[in-house]
Image (cartoon, rainbow, N blue to C red):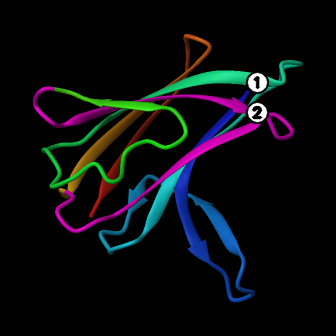
């Protein structure tokens, strides 16, 4: 398995590129997220993402359309769960900087089939 965190940015060619980094620029609509490449014969997997911010954001965005999401009582942690089909073993999730998001240290923990697959600590600045 391979796990990476980074930002998504527009290349000169017009295509979206994934750039591995642990710093996300604090710019509206800047996309960021994680990518996992799994070695499995399974057609589908269940993943769970626990995403903790340094402070409660103004919003966690639109309701989860592809799975389910719960937000902690203090508003700092979102837990998203999905079952997805694999594309060459690839799974990912992305977020974007929105007005009201806090700056600081963020932490994402990703579990695949109940097993911790990656911990991503990064700074939004």
On the image, the x and y values in percent for residue 42 come to 83, 18
Apparent side of residue 65 relative to residue 45 in the rendered image (left or right): left
Instruction: Report which quarter residue 75 is drawn in.
Output: top left
Q: Which residues are magenta?
A: 73-101
Image x and y of residue 36, in percent: 67, 36
Q: Position of residue 82 (x, y in %)?
A: 56, 29
* Residue 116 in the figure: left or right of residue 22: right
Classify mark 2: helix, strand or loop: strand
Q: Earlier in the sequence, mark 1 or mark 2?
A: 1
99 or 61, which lies in front?
61
Q: How many marks?
A: 2
Q: Classify mark 1: residues with Cα within 10 Å, few (<14), some (14-19) or many (20+).
A: few
Is residue 124 part of the magenta span, yes or no? no
Picture layout, residue 52 above or below residue 33: above
Marks 1 and 2, how far apart at CA: 4 Å
Q: Quadrant of the C terminus?
A: bottom left
Residue at 25% x, 33% y: name it. Answer: 77
Q: Which residue is mark 2?
A: 85
Is residue 86 highlighted in magenta?
A: yes
Instruction: Say which residue appears at 39% left-offset and 72% top-offset.
Output: 29
* Displayed quadrant of residue 56: top left
Q: Are marks 1 and 2 in contact (CB under 8 Å)?
A: yes
Up/down of 10 relative to 87, above or below: below
Task: Give the percent coordinates (x, y) of residue 54.
Answer: 17, 43
Residue beneath the point at 13% across and 44% down: 55
The residue that mark 1 highlights is 44
The residue lying at 82 percent from left, 40 percent from top is: 87
Q: Residue furthest top?
A: 114
């Amino acid at each position: 398995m391979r796990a990476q965190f980074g930002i998504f940015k527009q290349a000169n060619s017009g295509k979206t590129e994934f750039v591995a980094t642990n710093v996300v620029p604090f710019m509206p609509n800047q996309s960021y997220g994680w990518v996992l490449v799994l070695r499995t014969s399974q057609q589908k997997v269940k993943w769970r993402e626990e995403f903790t911010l340094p402070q409660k954001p103004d919003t966690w965005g639109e309701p989860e359309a592809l799975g389910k999401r719960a937000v902690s009582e203090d508003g700092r942690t979102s837990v998203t769960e999905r079952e997805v089909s694999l594309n060459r073993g690839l799974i990912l999730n992305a977020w974007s900087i929105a007005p009201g998001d806090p700056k600081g240290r963020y932490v994402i923990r990703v579990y695949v089939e109940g097993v911790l697959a990656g911990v991503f600590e990064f700074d939004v600045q």
